[in-house]
Image (spheres, rainbow, N blue to C red):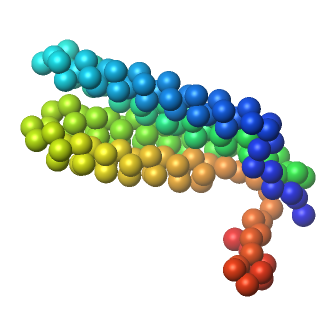
Amino acid sequence: MGHLDHATFGWLTPVLSYAMACVGAALGLQCTVRALGTTGRSRRNWLITAASAIGTGIWTMHFVAMLGFGVSGTEIRYDVPLTLLSLFVAMVVVGAGVFVVGYGRERGRALALGGLTTGLGVASMHYLGMAALRLHGDAVGTTDAGHAVRS
């Protein structure tokens, strides 16, 4: 039975993934602020740039963190089409949230709807990314009572 290791490279992958998320968020929020000060095509272009920065920042954070995941005794691989789909979902759904904020008339409502949309997109990206994980074997966990459970 292999041993599950959440931090194969120690603190390197969690720190790098956190840094990627911060950079993506900072760039995306800066682009969103710029978009709110413009109109027309310029607003649209800034919002597309913001969605790209935030979406790829979130996805990169997730993927870099997953690279730190290891299981002794088996090779970990990723389904490339599913992995790319998770990137696409992150960018598109975050884009929808950013556009809701960028074009919303009522600021509070736009932020709530945009945040909910973005959150659902992040959750979808996360589960698609996890579904792309390929390894040989079964995952065995325990119940609260300590009984082994296979999944």
Q: Quadrant of residue 139?
A: bottom right
Task: Point out residue 46 in the picture as x, y percentages from the top left corner.
Answer: 27, 19
Residue at image point 24% right, 42% down: 111
76 or 49, nearer to the observer: 49
Residue 98 appears in the figure: yes
In the displayed structure, does residue 132 sit left or right of residue 72? left
- Residue furthest left as drawn: 105
Q: Quadrant of the N terminus?
A: bottom right
Residue at image point 65% right, 30% down: 16
Q: Quadrant of residue 4?
A: bottom right
Residue 41 appears in the figure: no
Task: Point out residue 102 in the picture as x, y percentages from the top left corner.
Answer: 20, 31
Q: How many marks?
A: 0
77 or 15, nearer to the observer: 15
In the displayed structure, does residue 88 sit left or right of residue 16? left
Residue at image point 46% right, 52% down: 123
Q: Quadrant of residue 100?
A: top left
Residue at image point 77% right, 44% down: 7
Q: Quadrant of the C terminus?
A: bottom right
79 or 113, nearer to the observer: 113
In the displayed structure, does residue 104 sit left or right of residue 116? left
